[in-house]
Amino acid sequence: MTCYLGLGSNLDDPERQLQDALAALAKLPRSRLAAASPVYRSEPVGPDGQDDYLNAVVALITELQPLELLDALQAIENNQGRVRDERWGPRTIDLDILLFGEQRIDEPRLQVPHPAMAERNFVLVPLTDICDPRLVVPGGSDLATLADRCSGGRLERTRIRLKTH
């Protein structure tokens, strides 16, 4: 199954946090990284006073089931010092399942497609960098249309490249 994951960080050397998360993703059982988008700098969503985020999207081919993958992602977040004390607050690393093949998932712990992705240019733009923009999001529009409709906030492509090897 090909799934797409969003990565974001705005604490404790965000570039290193993204690279460490990518290295951990590359070690997931029965999975392999297929692609990584360029890294983007975005203004934070949530409480005022946060630093900008660095964001990227990766394609992961996996045999893990959705909730197994979610557990693995949360373990990576915990290992990188993620603290969940403030909704949309600053974080060392945030790993989100954006798409899981063509599946729609509505579980108490997991909703796929990610419920807020249509409003987040820092998700849609890097996703279209590594995915066919004509891909139709389950239950929605194609990626290009979603990206065009998304006003989002400030978004700037950086020169940072994630190493997928």
Image (cartoon, rainbow, N blue to C red):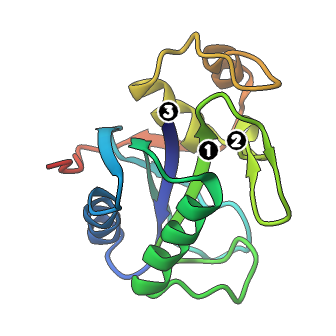
Measuring from the top left, give residue 31's x and y in whole percent.
35, 50
Count residues near mark 2 (Cα–Cα under 10 Å), then give few for <14, some for 14-19, many for 20+: some
Q: Do the residues under discs 2 and 1 have CB atoms within 8 angstroms?
A: yes
Tell me where residue 148 sits by quadrant: top right
Tell me where residue 138 sits by quadrant: top right
Q: Is residue 67 left or right of residue 32?
A: right
Q: Residue at x 50, y 32 (%)?
A: 127
Residue behind mark 2: 117
Q: Is residue 68 above or below residue 30?
A: below
Out of 149 and 85, give the one closest to the viewer.
85
Amino acid type of the residue tagged 1 in the rendering:
Leu
Give the CA distance from mark 2 to mark 3. 10 Å
Give the CA distance from mark 3 to mark 1. 9 Å
Amino acid type of the residue tagged 3 in the rendering:
Leu
Amino acid type of the residue tagged 2 in the rendering:
Met
Give the CA distance from mark 2 to mark 1. 7 Å
- Reading the chain from its start, which is encountered first: label 2 or label 3? 2
Q: Do the residues under discs 3 and 1 have CB atoms within 8 angstroms?
A: yes
Q: Residue at x 76, y 17 (%)?
A: 141
Secondary element under disc 3, as helix, strand or loop, is helix
Q: Do the residues under discs 2 and 3 have CB atoms within 8 angstroms?
A: yes
Residue 152 appearing in the image: yes
Out of 2 and 77, give the one closest to the viewer.
2
Residue behind mark 3: 127
- Reading the chain from its start, which is encountered first: label 3 or label 1? 1
Residue 58 appearing in the image: no
What numbered label is drawn on residue 98?
A: 1
Count residues near mark 3 (Cα–Cα under 10 Å), then give few for <14, some for 14-19, many for 20+: many
